[in-house]
Amino acid sequence: MPDTSKAQSRAVEDFLKAVYALQQHLPQHERVSTNALKEMLKISAPSVTDMAQRLLEARLIDYEKYYGVRLTEAGLLIALKIIRRHRLIELYLVKELGYALHEVHDDAESLEHAVSERFITAIAARLHDPAFDPHGDPIPSAEGLIVPRELLPLTEMPLTAPAKVARFIADTPQMLQYMLDKGFALNHPVIVLAREPFEGPLTLRLNEQETVIGYQVAAAILVETTRRPDDPPA
């Protein structure tokens, strides 16, 4: 017989993780809509409502009908724990097992619910307690802390300002693979040389070579400026 307790636990963890992901794009204190959760989790509206009611009773979310949900402190800690697991596993798959970057998500999604806390602690130690996963996403610490960074998409980066690639937020494995094929990699230097209007293509200097990418791809590549505040203008 299938282990329904594990399935229920995974459903809870996936729900809390989805609420966390959606909260990141909302103003502080605004609630995540049940419709957004339905779309992200690919489940029915009654299933979302049922889970929200269960997690409200468990004090893992704050849920108001018609207004949506927010994580409580307890729910936030569980969400960050699962995100930590997922991102550490992704990094381990890339660094130790030779996975390509666009291949890691699905296996990490399965393993994050299956492995023990001892296993996650061992991975973290093996990788020297990394702060970022192979996509540049921050890895929460064991205490649920995240390293803050100020990042901009290439579409908003000032022209000629030196920067380095810091994070990929591609919607699909195909888009991610396209970025990699174009030569993008974490911490590689990049400068926006020109940007066409009306969401047109961008001309970049990447690894000392000039290249052109579309607006949609550029919006999914986040960068960190490498110019110090006292540096003269380029």
Image (cartoon, rainbow, N blue to C red):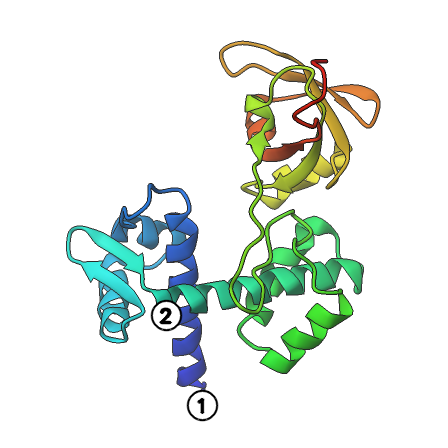
- Location of residue 228 in the rendering, given as x and y in whole percent from the top left corner: 69, 28
The residue that appears at 65% across and 47% down in the rendered structure is 136
Residue matched to label 2: 74
Please determine whether, in this image, residue 99 is positioned above or below residue 212: below
* Amino acid type shown at disc 2: Ala
Looking at the image, can residue 179 be seen?
A: yes
> Residue 72 occupies which quadrant of the picture?
bottom left
Residue nearest the viewer, comparing 80 with 107 = 80
* Amino acid type shown at disc 1: Met
Please determine whether, in this image, residue 76 is positioned above or below residue 214: below
Mark with earlier residue (2, 1): 1
- Location of residue 69 in the rendering, given as x and y in whole percent from the top left corner: 26, 56
Residue matched to label 1: 1
The residue that appears at 35% across and 42% down in the rendered structure is 26
Q: Are marks 2 and 1 in contact (CB under 8 Å)?
A: no
Mark 2, secondary structure of its residue: helix
- Location of residue 234 in the rendering, given as x and y in whole percent from the top left corner: 72, 13
Kindly report which numbered mark, 2 or 1, lies closer to the viewer in this rendering: 2
Mark 1, secondary structure of its residue: loop
3D distance between C-alphas at marks 2 and 1: 32 Å
